[in-house]
Amino acid sequence: MSTKYKATTTEEAYFITITTVGWVDVFTRLNQKYVVINALQHCQQNKGLEIYAYCIMSSHIHLLCKATNGFILSDVIRDIKKFTSKKIIQMLIEEPESRREWMLINFKKACAHLKRKQEYKVWQDSYHAEIVETNWFIKQKINYIHNNSVKEKIVTLPEDYYFNSARNYASLENDLEVIILDLF
């Protein structure tokens, strides 16, 4: 498997995009978004994850982050994907969801090509990771992350989107703490 866009080193920060299979709009409800928030908080507290910027969109997540304390970021991302996949499937089965059948069919179809036995697949196998090497790159990626919801016309201002670290940078209420980078 290629490591071109994998976070395989330790102590470096990465810009990461994690995408659902078929770009299925999974994260359209609060409870689904909180599955991601809770997983990220767990990894911050228990797996050395430092988050500098994030945005949870309907079909993907952007992170500017790194793993510390001897943890490897690719392992942390793997664990996030594994945990959130199980929780999302569990929620689809147990809680009211108008798109239940359609989503489960899509997640089941995504397993058709797999050699290992798996009933549902929520996330694409890989994720896109780019190593952070310059302050210019950091600024560009934070602006990209924060403006993702503006570009999609969900909100007018980045800090108006609740599941976005632009709120942290604007000192507004938020549910996920980040490390504010003083580059702006």
Image (cartoon, rainbow, N blue to C red):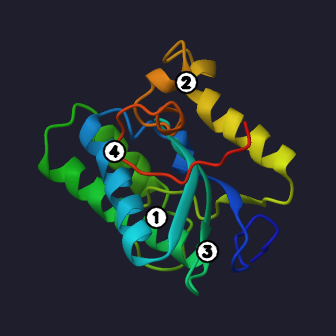
> Residue 165 at x, y = what percent?
51, 40
In the picture, measured across the screen, residue 168 lies left or right of residue 175, that is: right
Q: Is residue 151 above or below residue 74?
A: above
Mark seen at residue 74: 3
User: Sequence-wise, which precedes: disc 3 or disc 2?
Assistant: 3
Question: Separation of disc 1 and disc 3 at Cα?
Answer: 11 Å
Q: Amino acid at mark 1?
A: Lys
Mark seen at residue 175: 4
Q: Residue at the location (21% across, 51% down)?
A: 91
In the picture, measured across the screen, residue 92 lies left or right of residue 82, that is: left
Residue 22 picture quarter:
top right
In the picture, measured across the screen, residue 72 lies left or right of residue 110, that is: right
Question: Separation of disc 3 and disc 2 at Cα?
Answer: 28 Å
Q: Residue at the location (39% across, 49% down)?
A: 176
> Residue 19 at x, y = what percent?
57, 49
**Residue at the disc numbered 1:** 81
Please name whichever residue, 169 or 40, is drawn nearer the observer in this view of the structure: 169
Q: Residue at the location (32% across, 57% down)?
A: 38
**Residue at the disc numbered 2:** 158
Instruction: Tell me whether circle 1 and circle 2 mark residues in contact (CB < 8 Å).
Output: no
